Amino acid sequence: MKTRLSPSLRGWLASILTVLLVASGVSIGSLSAVAATAPQESTAPAAGGEVTGDPSENTVTPVTYEVAGAPAPVPTSPPAQASDSDSAPEPTAAALSVSKVSGLDPDGETITVTGTNIETDFANRHGPGKAGLYAQIGYLDSSWRPSQGAPSDARSNAYSTWVKEAAMGADGYLVWTDNGDGTADFSWEVEVEYDALESVRRAGSTLAVFTLGGGGTVQSVNELAVPISFNVPSVSVSKTTNLDSTGETITITGSGFLPHAPETNGARPPLAGKFAGTYVVFGKFPDVWQPSKGADSSARKTPRDMTKWAVHEGDMAAIGGPASGAVKLDVDGNFTATIAVKKGFIDEPATGNYGIYTYSGSGAAYTRFETYTPLSFTPLATDLTFTTSPVGQATVGESVTLRAKLASPTPGSIKFSAGSTNLGSAATGSDGTATLVAKSLPIGTHALKAEFTPADPTSFVGSSSGLSYTVIAKPVAVTAAGSLTWGVKQSFRDYVSGPIAAGSISTTNVRSTGSAFVFGQASGGTFNGSTGTSNYTGSVRFLGHGGILDLTLSNPVVRVDSANSGTLLLRVNGATVPFATARHSHQPGCRGVRQRRVAVLPGRHVARQGELRHRCPERGFHGNPHGFGLCLTKKRDPPDPACEQRYHPRWFRSGGAGRW
């Protein structure tokens, strides 16, 4: 009776024997073994479900393991056959082969699956007899073997049979041929169809014929796989990730785009009634875009310069030639096209999936021509400009408008902060602008920051911008010392608040009287009796045209440069500028004003705009394009009735535009 050791025990004994022989110094030359190369499994199957590797390269290769330090073998005669009838040679490794592994007819083709030297010494855990093994055809994940801990959902199949020593009275069994040495062979003839296997396709998986343990057993020695593929359309793209968002050219290669009449015949001109080839396009399509699924053409918006049409060479002229996007589709169904792809193309949909798409031309609808290869881009940068109004500085309690604008309008929000204090957020508008009004900035210098967060972080990157901003204490008005009354041309006021500018005029710590504004005198002047400054406090803001016109004039200062000249200084949108110069001059026709020279004494004068507005209206305003005027009258200290006596006004002019 022949005794056969189990596979695991045989392997253990062989390892021990080798170690003992080497340790004893026996010259054994080399030990030969037979190893089956693992099937090549594609990590990225083509769009049609086929395996992109060449399964014919899966081979059984003899491997020689050299023993270190062993002398070269001496040629000898072949050993005589053992006379012991109970001894038998060790079986070769289990192997799996398929009669045809590539170019299978998608409409159906019969293949023969052959298993040899399959290990059979596994008991059925769910019934009588041996466990056998399953032979299946379907899709495998990159890690699919039960012996390596892969779950059952790492495999799918459309065709399956249980290979055993005997059928168990039902369909789905295949009887093996026992080799009498603990191994068996089998042959399975099965017709496979592409569509049936497509129904069990797994994302990122490989189509293959494979075997694994049956009867609830794990049989690592019998876990074998051979990839197969059909002759169906497939597409490969030279680069699919981290594409330049502003534009990058990629190469698209297609194969298997063969005529399949009548499905691939055009339904409309120019290729109506004949093979219409395939469109090859870049687009941003919705999840359901395929013509075969009834999707309208509006679901497939594509830029014209990113659209190619692969047709037979004889039909290229009919569709406009290469200038119109025609590319050659050879008789074997192959094509190569290049497309410059980018984000933000004309009429790009707001949502969808970037990718290379193929589908039948001239109105045909054929499922197998409909492929999708996803593309992804590096996120677009979003440059940000950050400004404030008033610029650079404000008085405590004064509202500060924070404005951030993106170089390109991008959906998202902008967060404004002062140091670690969150001031609030605002959504970007259609022009890429976000605005926030801050009303509670304390006295001191602040690190203001605007930070953009895109609504679509996969397409855009965030950005930020910062600036330093100062908030000063409010000047203390000294009303007893005097005031500055300042008139603004009525036509300008009407323009701001009227229907054209649709704006407003607002004041802070300034009193309005008619068309004039009264600024209280503040401390801090430097007038020494002949030269120096006199300070006033308050602000007037003119806002119109939706913020385009935004002018704030505040905190006037009269600076006496000499007994005959002076300068009016104003903060214009936060920046101090020389606004006007003053000099003695005679103003003919100014009724009720004495023609007398007086010394300008800032800080001890009261500005009375009424002198200009009522007594010299034509010369006081119409001659000045800016519409601002100032008239000073003397005020003695201590108070004196002569304070009300009107003297010759000091006329100011702005930027050389003429006297006021």
Image (cartoon, grey):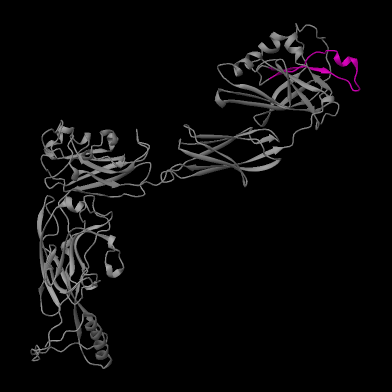
Q: Residue at x 10, y 77 (%)?
A: 179
The quarter of the picture where residue 357 lies is: top left
Horizontal relation, residue 475 to residue 260: left or right: right
The spot of residue 464 in percent (x, y) is: 53, 43
Horizontal relation, residue 616 to residue 605: left or right: left
The quarter of the picture where residue 488 lies is: top right
Q: Residue at x 91, y 17 (%)?
A: 640
The spot of residue 127 in percent (x, y) is: 20, 71
- Tell me how many marks there are: 0
Image position of 70 with respect to 246: above or below: below
576 in magenta? no
Range of residues picked out in magenta:
628-653
Quadrant where the N terminus is found in the figure:
bottom left
From this viewpoint, is residue 83 visible?
yes
Q: Nearer the viewer, residue 589 or 308?
A: 308
Q: Nearer the viewer, residue 70 or 112?
A: 112
Image position of 215 with respect to 454: above or below: below
Horizontal relation, residue 501 to residue 255: left or right: right
The spot of residue 155 in percent (x, y) is: 25, 60
Image position of 323 with respect to 64: above or below: above
The spot of residue 55 in percent (x, y) is: 17, 61
Q: Residue at x 75, y 10 (%)?
A: 587
The quarter of the picture where residue 624 lies is: top right
From this viewpoint, is residue 603 visible?
no
Quadrant where the C terminus is found in the figure:
top right
Residue lying at the far bottom of the rendered structure: 24
Q: Nearer the viewer, residue 442 or 404?
A: 442
Image position of 91 with respect to 340: above or below: below
